[in-house]
């Protein structure tokens, strides 16, 4: 069975505005992000009649404007960094420039391939992909405005909300009028910003700041707290800060943005107050990376009996059920951890529950990776979290330079550390700031999932010279009888 695509080019297959009879489905989904599309493909494949409504980005933000495109741009910046420093590797270079139009073209080609793959998957699954914008008009009932202005009404035995989030713009005088970049527009630049000002020293801000720095931009990050990545342990924040500053990044901490003037892409000025002193920063471009807000405005959730949290996210329980029977929510719009891999697990939870199971989100591991260079990756407890919970632990810590493979790569920056329960061998958490930290973290996470004691990694025979080999050195770095009481 092939999927059906309804838009202005297929007017014979749509219902007009005058037809108010809802079309019945087993499952109606609004938004086509990872949790939504996997649910559509899976349940359609099991014989359910499924309709999924997407207003713009087929496959959601990850393959279009977020995770994958940003990592594509970041890798181009990594190549630029390697070429710039190639003489240290014995490779002489003559002539070096950045062609941002080509950088963008590479990213666009990847996105196009991803979207085409999604469309093909919808066709093969039997799920009906509807191009349009939907909102609730009643319990489990959506009205969809199609691309040509016509409407359809859809009612599902079950409905999944997966509308995601978007970049937030704080109510700062002059900010909106300056037409700043968000991550979406930053990934579409065809020129290197001469001087880029970045509001926000979190994950998105730092990834894009370093990339633009490596393309040749002068970059200044404005962060309201006293350190970058304020949710991470202080040693992580300090190490990453020092690495980025050494690379040329300018950082203004404890800085409150008071006003913005000018137009991003031309000339823009940002007035900041830092420790009681006002300063004006001037740039050619302005990027805002200060968090996310949910896409629930205009969704008409009150018509469906779906409640929102005080921050505007869809209120769900541990089964990802909303306050309305038969209506579920997945992904960022639930207010949970905003990672694609969490949306993937949300799909597992919701699809199993729709099919009669009882799966919950309680207690699941939430790994993450920041794709600066070097990477930052963590799973389980940080030291800060362990202390807040009053949990005693043993700390194992090793410089990345202690892993011989890093010397062959000339990438010895950073360190990795692990927390092990004080009176046992269970791994409580792992953090790495270093080359390929995400891959190393995943190996430890698998050990944690399997309930392996830290000694299994310490005593394992791991191939030499590899980065994973460093786990043996890490877990041998603290004598077994040396407990740290926190």
Image (cartoon, grey):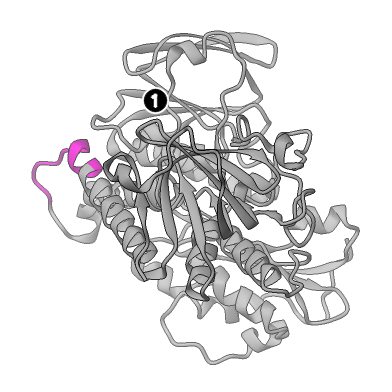
User: What quarter of the picture does the C terminus occupy?
Assistant: bottom right
User: What quarter of the picture does the N terminus occupy?
Assistant: bottom left
| Above or below: residue 115 compared with residue 298 | below
Could you tell me which residue is drawn at 37 percent across and 33 percent down? 186
Could you tell me which residue is drawn at 58 percent across and 60 percent down? 27
Total marks in image? 1
Q: Specify whether residue 398 is painted magenta.
A: no
Q: Among all residues in the image, which is located at the extreme left?
A: 94
Give 334 or 289, whichever is nearer the viewer. Answer: 334
Is residue 131 visible in this depiction of the protein? yes
Give 362 or 304, whichever is nearer the viewer. Answer: 304
Give 90 or 1, whichever is nearer the viewer. Answer: 1
Is residue 330 visible in this depiction of the protein? no
Q: State left or right for residue 49 relative to residue 186.
A: right
Q: Specify whether residue 98 is painted magenta.
A: yes
| Above or below: residue 268 compared with residue 486 | above
Q: State left or right for residue 401 relative to residue 354.
A: left
Is label 1 in a helix, a strand or a loop?
strand
Q: Position of residue 49 (x, y in %)?
A: 51, 64
Q: Quadrant of residue 328?
A: bottom right
Check disc 1: other Cα within 10 Å, few if <14, some if 14-19, many if 20+: many
Q: Position of residue 118 (x, y in %)?
A: 36, 59
Q: State left or right for residue 352 relative to residue 407.
A: right
Q: Position of residue 16 (x, y in %)?
A: 43, 36
Could you tell me which residue is drawn at 61 percent across and 75 percent down? 444
Q: Which residue is mark 1?
A: 196
Q: Position of residue 332 (x, y in %)?
A: 61, 48
Q: Which residues lie in the magenta part?
A: 93-104
């Amino acid at each position: 069975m092939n999927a059906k695509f309804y838009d202005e080019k297929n007017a014979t297959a749509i219902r007009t505005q005058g037809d108010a009879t809802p079309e019945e489905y087993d499952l109606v989904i609004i938004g086509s992000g990872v949790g939504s599309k996997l649910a559509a493909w899976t349940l359609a494949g099991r014989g359910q009649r499924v309709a999924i409504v997407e207003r713009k980005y087929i496959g959601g933000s990850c393959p279009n404007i977020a995770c994958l495109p940003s990592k594509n741009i970041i890798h181009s910046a990594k190549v630029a960094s390697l070429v710039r420093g190639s003489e240290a590797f014995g490779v002489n270079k003559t002539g070096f420039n950045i062609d941002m139009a080509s950088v963008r073209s590479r990213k666009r080609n990847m996105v196009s391939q991803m979207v085409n793959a999604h469309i093909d998957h919808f066709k093969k699954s039997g799920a009906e992909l509807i191009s349009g914008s939907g909102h609730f008009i009643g319990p489990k009932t959506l009205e969809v405005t199609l691309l040509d202005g016509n409407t359809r009404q859809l009612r599902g035995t079950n409905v999944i909300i997966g509308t995601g989030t978007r970049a937030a713009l704080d109510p700062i005088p002059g900010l909106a009028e300056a037409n700043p970049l968000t991550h979406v527009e930053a990934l579409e630049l065809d020129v290197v910003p001469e001087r880029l000002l970045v509001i926000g020293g979190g994950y998105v801000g730092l990834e894009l700041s370093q990339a633009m720095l490596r393309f040749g931009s002068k970059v200044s990050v404005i962060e309201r707290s006293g350190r970058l990545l304020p949710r991470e342990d202080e040693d992580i924040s300090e190490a990453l800060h020092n690495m980025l500053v050494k690379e040329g990044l300018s950082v203004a901490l404890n800085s409150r943005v008071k006003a913005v003037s000018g137009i991003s892409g031309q000339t823009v000025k940002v007035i900041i107050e830092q420790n009681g002193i006002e300063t004006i920063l001037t740039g050619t471009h302005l990027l805002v990376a200060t968090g996310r807000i949910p896409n629930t405005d205009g969704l008409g959730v009150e018509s469906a009996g779906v409640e929102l949290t005080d921050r505007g996210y869809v209120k769900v329980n541990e089964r990802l059920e909303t306050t309305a029977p038969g209506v579920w929510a997945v992904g960022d719009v639930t207010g949970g951890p905003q990672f694609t891999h969490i949306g993937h697990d949300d799909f597992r939870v919701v699809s199993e529950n729709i099919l009669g199971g009882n799966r919950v989100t309680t207690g699941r591991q939430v790994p993450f990776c920041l794709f600066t260079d070097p990477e930052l990756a963590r799973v389980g407890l940080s030291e800060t979290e362990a202390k807040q919970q009053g949990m005693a632990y043993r700390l194992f810590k090793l410089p990345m330079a202690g892993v011989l493979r890093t010397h062959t790569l000339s990438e010895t920056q950073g360190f990795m550390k692990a927390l092990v329960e004080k009176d046992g061998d269970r791994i409580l958490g792992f953090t790495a700031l270093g080359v390929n930290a995400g891959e190393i973290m995943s190996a430890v996470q698998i050990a944690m999932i399997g309930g392996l004691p830290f000694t299994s990694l310490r005593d394992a025979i791991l191939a030499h010279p590899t980065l994973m080999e460093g786990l043996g050195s890490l877990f041998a770095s603290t004598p077994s009888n040396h407990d740290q009481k926190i």
